[in-house]
Each structure stands twice: as C-alpha cells, then as structure tokens.
C-alpha cells in the first residue's frame, strides 16, 4: 500500500488474448495497471529486495538512488497524458528515456546480474 508521499497512476486497458479468452467469442481481456511512485520518505534498498551479496547490493542501491532522483519529474510526465502511461506499460525503458532524455539506460541494463 502506498504511503502518503507516493503518487499513483492508474491505467485501464485491454489486451488481445492468444486463444480468444475464456469467454466464447471474446479475444480481449481487460487489464488494470497501477503505477506507484517511489516514496519520498524512504528510498528502497537492496535489503528490501532480499539482496545480501555486497557487490550486488551496492549496484542496486546506486540504481535505486538514481531512480529516486528522477522520481518526481518522471511521475509528472506520467500523469501529464494517458499516452505516457500506455508507453510506460508497453516499453518502460523507452518511456523513461522519453520522459528523462538524459537518463542513462545502462543504469537499468546493468542490473541483469543483480537478480540472478
């Protein structure tokens, strides 16, 4: 549950299902997505994600700090237009780069080994 400092953006959409859905004649499934900002009261840490390896924790903590630094401007962009929320749902990295052009995507792509 978000704390009082967190913002939420809700997106209601639908997706086509491969097998026509569970209802006869339907090929569309309704989905509800909720995007929650990082807390301004406490930036998450590697410990919150169960990461105990020191090198991995350092890498994740650095990434979380960098994400926290763009949290407010990203959520302003996300709230500005429903097209932004749709882009974020479909292509999160492209959305972040669109909202924060100076964002170094390597910050996120370097995380692949943290959760292995």
Image (cartoon, helix red, strand yellow):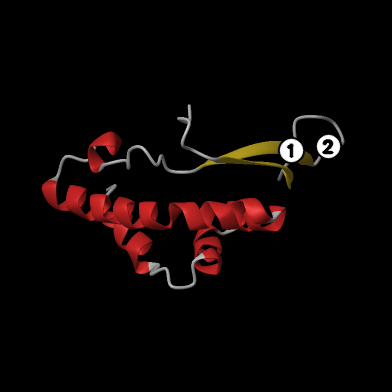
Q: Do residues under tags 1 and 2 come within 8 Å of each other at their CB atoms?
A: yes
Residue that carries the numbered disc 2 in the rendered image = 26
108 horizontally vs 88: left or right: left
Report the Cα–Cα distance between label 1 and label 2: 8 Å
Where is residue 110 shown, x and y percent of the image? 30, 62
Against 9, is 4 above or below?
above
Q: Quadrant of residue 25?
A: top right
Res. 20 in view: no
Residue that carries the numbered disc 1 in the rendered image = 29
Res. 113 in view: yes
Q: Quadrant of residue 48?
A: top left
Q: Residues within 10 Å of mark 2 (few under 14, many from 20)?
A: few
Where is residue 63 shown, x and y percent of the image? 30, 55
Q: Quadrant of residue 29?
A: top right
Where is residue 42 shown, x and y percent of the image? 33, 38
- Residue furthest bottom as drawn: 102
Where is residue 17 shown, x and y percent of the image? 72, 43
């Amino acid at each position: 549950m978000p704390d009082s400092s967190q913002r939420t953006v809700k997106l209601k959409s639908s997706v086509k299902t491969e097998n026509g859905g569970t209802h006869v004649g339907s090929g569309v499934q309704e989905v509800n997505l909720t995007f929650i900002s990082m807390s301004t009261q406490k930036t998450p840490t590697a410990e919150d994600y169960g990461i105990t390896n020191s090198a991995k924790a350092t890498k994740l903590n650095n990434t979380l700090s960098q994400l926290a630094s763009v949290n407010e401007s990203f959520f302003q962009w996300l709230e500005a237009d429903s097209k932004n929320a749709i882009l974020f749902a479909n292509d999160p990295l492209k959305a972040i780069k669109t909202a924060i052009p100076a964002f170094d995507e390597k910050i996120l792509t370097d995380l692949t080994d943290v959760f292995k």
